[in-house]
Amino acid sequence: MDPYRGPAPKGHIPASQRIPAIARPFVSARALKTLDAVEKFVEEECIPADAVYNQALGETTQERFSAHPQIMEDLKTKAKQLGLWNMFLPKNHFSEGAGYSNLEYGLMAEYLGRSLTASEATNCAAPDTGNMEVFAKYGTEEQKKKWLRPLLDGEIRSGFLMTEPQVASSDATNIELNMKKDGDYFILNGQVGLLCSIFRTGYSNGRLQKWWASGVGDLRTKVFLVMGKSDPANPNKYKQQTVIAVPSDTPGITIKRMLSVLGYDDAPHGHGHVFFDNVRVHKSNVILGEGRGFEVVQGRLGPGRIHHAMRSVGAAEKALEYFLARVNDPRKRPFGKQLSEHGIMLERIARSRIEIDAARLAVLNAAIMIDQGDAKHALKEIAEVKVQVPRMLQEIIDRAIQAYGAGGVSQDTPLANMSSGARTMRIVDGPDEVHMLQLGRNENKRGKALLGKIEAQKQKTQALLKQYNMQERDILQLDRRSGTSAKL
Ligand SMILES: Cc1cc2nc3c(=O)[nH]c(=O)nc-3n(C[C@H](O)[C@H](O)[C@H](O)COP(=O)(O)OP(=O)(O)OC[C@H]3O[C@@H](n4cnc5c(N)ncnc54)[C@H](O)[C@@H]3O)c2cc1C
């Protein structure tokens, strides 16, 4: 029976039967099977493991960023046995992945987004996913052997280091880290600018830095993809940058501190503030070529941007589940009624359903567009979901928190932690404003043509009035002259 029609069916409907009708023709039988397996794995193995994993990380900063709980390795082994591994690498662009399309992975990522552990357990966690795409797309055979293979096997992790504290990094042309050629090597180093010296809070010591380097806290992170300026004098500001793979044990790198996200440490991968001091890296580690860093960054962020959106749809479903559970708790009866009997709660549930479903359609549409061309072909759709989905997620988590009262902002539900993650989504991979600007500019390109079209339509109306022997008349025409008095 179609679960979308008729009375609400009893019992659980598997994920494969809940796919939006619009996406169904694009999903293979194999992917449907995997989707159900992902759902089962996340619900039955990962979500119960989340709290255990978090507790196993330990307590102090040193502990939490050195830990590698056994439960994660056990989940990875189970996931591999179930064939739930590397589903993110799309089949029409890469041969190294599990052979699914972006759309198929999108449906799966929704379930991964419900759990703290599921993405890493299936080797589909950021920032490794984007970094693996970079190595698969642009890497030399040697780079693939050294880093892509162990990343694909889940043996190491990786970081992507672009953002710098001293510049507005949402505009990547501002990136300052200096990459100076020295024979066959690049030396990653440099002086901080004036603004940086003013801004620093004792963390600079005159060295160039990277921050918000996700993944660098994890001791298993063995390679950083670092963006720097190798040709700052190039008149083309998009050719000044190079991305280079830097082994994390290269002398001169200091992970000075980890950054909190609205109070959460996101251990063990975390987000690091990293210093570079005369870091020597062989030129064979350059990705794609000198001066092609912009291309690498752009290529990396296409599908990656919607991976967040896909997981966010799942996180929103989880928040709604918590919301529904809370309003149906028979012990909680404010003003003599269970919360689900208060109309405002039902309205919030309905709104949440509408907003999640709308966001999912937009995300799946973006995925289909990428599958049918590439990320460039789907820039508009990617930007749309990059902006739309985090706002939806924040709103739904907020409603769920409200339904829990004070308990909602505490550690007793995952909602507070989820809320911090959702908030960051409006900043990571470029802040909303950058995408809005691009979307607005592109949409606005139609403006002049539309002005002409509307004018032409008006002229045609005039011609039709003439043809039908009619005088133009305003629909509220009154023609009242001064001195007219009211009839009593
Ligand atoms: C949890 C988390 C993880 C991250 N992981 C990584 C990572 O792994 N690697 C990495 O390199 N970076 C990472 N980042 C950094 C992130 O990509 C940057 O913070 C982001 O690109 C914005 O750069 P910025 O912080 O320098 O802000 P700025 O560029 O200084 O921008 C500040 C604000 O200015 C406004 N703004 C910017 N551009 C415009 C515009 N065109 N129009 C109007 N307003 C504008 C926006 O409100 C923006 O938020 C992460 C960030 C977070 C929060």
Image (spheres, rainbow, N blue to C red):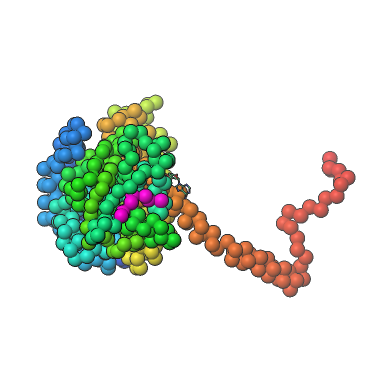
- Residue at 24% x, 41% y: name it: 255
At x 23% / y 60%, what residue is drawn?
184
Query: Can residue 452 be seen by looking at this rendering?
Result: yes
- Outermost residue, bottom side: 467
Q: Quadrant of residue 458?
A: bottom right
Q: Is residue 13 left or right of residue 333?
A: left
Q: Quadrant of residue 294?
A: bottom left
Residue 92 in the image, given as x and y percentages of width and height: 27, 68
Residue 20 is one of the magenta-drawn residues: no
Q: Position of residue 128 (x, y in %)?
A: 24, 53
Q: Nearer the viewer, residue 265 or 5?
A: 265
Residue 213 or 46: which is nearer the viewer? 213
Can you give x and y, in whole percent of width and height, for residue 159 in the image? 25, 50
* Name of the residue lying farthest toward the top: 335
Q: Is residue 94 left or right of residue 191?
A: left
Quarter-of-image position of residue 179: bottom left
**Residue located 68% across and 70% down the image:** 460
Q: Is residue 110 visible?
A: no
- Up/down of 52 relative to 135, above or below: above
Whether residue 384 sits left or right of residue 321 in the image: it is right
Of all residues, the one furthest to the right in this rendering is 483
Q: Is 353 on the left-hand or right-hand side of 11? A: right
Magenta residues span: 174-180
